[in-house]
Image: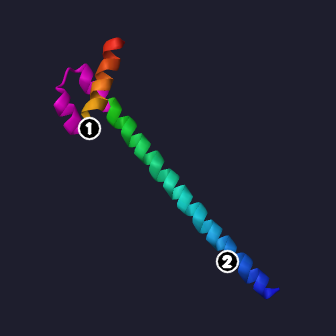
Amino acid sequence: MKLDRIYTESILKQEGEKVMELMTSYERKGYEIGIKKAKIEVAKNMLKMDINQDFIVEVTELSQSEVRQLREEQDRD
């Protein structure tokens, strides 16, 4: 009976650690998505101000192709 309890507590602890790792992973991913969205919004605003694309890439750390795509989207609107 005591061994069953120890085993169960051990399993629960392991599962709890897995859940915490998963939550941390999701939290980190959410943070990264938020940062990316913010960079895109900054780049869009800079494009509206007709700022040089190379400078936008440097400031936002977005790729040339990402900034080019944003410019093309704005040109269509």
Q: Position of residue 53 (x, y in %)?
A: 20, 28
Residue at image point 32% right, 24% down? 70
Residue at image point 35% right, 12% down? 76
Residue 15, placed above or below residue 3 = above
Does residue 26 show up magenta in the picture?
no
Q: Position of residue 49 (x, y in %)?
A: 22, 21
Q: Quadrant of the C terminus?
A: top left
Write down the residue under mark 1: 60
Amino acid at circle 2: Ser
Which stretch is magenta? 42-59
* Residue 10, numbered label: 2
Q: Which SS class for mark 1? A: helix
Amino acid at circle 1: Thr
Magenta span: chief secondary structure: helix
Q: Which SS class for mark 2? A: helix
Q: Position of residue 34 (x, y in %)?
A: 42, 41
Which quadrant holds residue 67?
top left
Residue at image point 43% right, 42% down? 33
Which quadrant holds residue 19?
bottom right
CA–CA distance between discs 2 and 1?
Answer: 46 Å
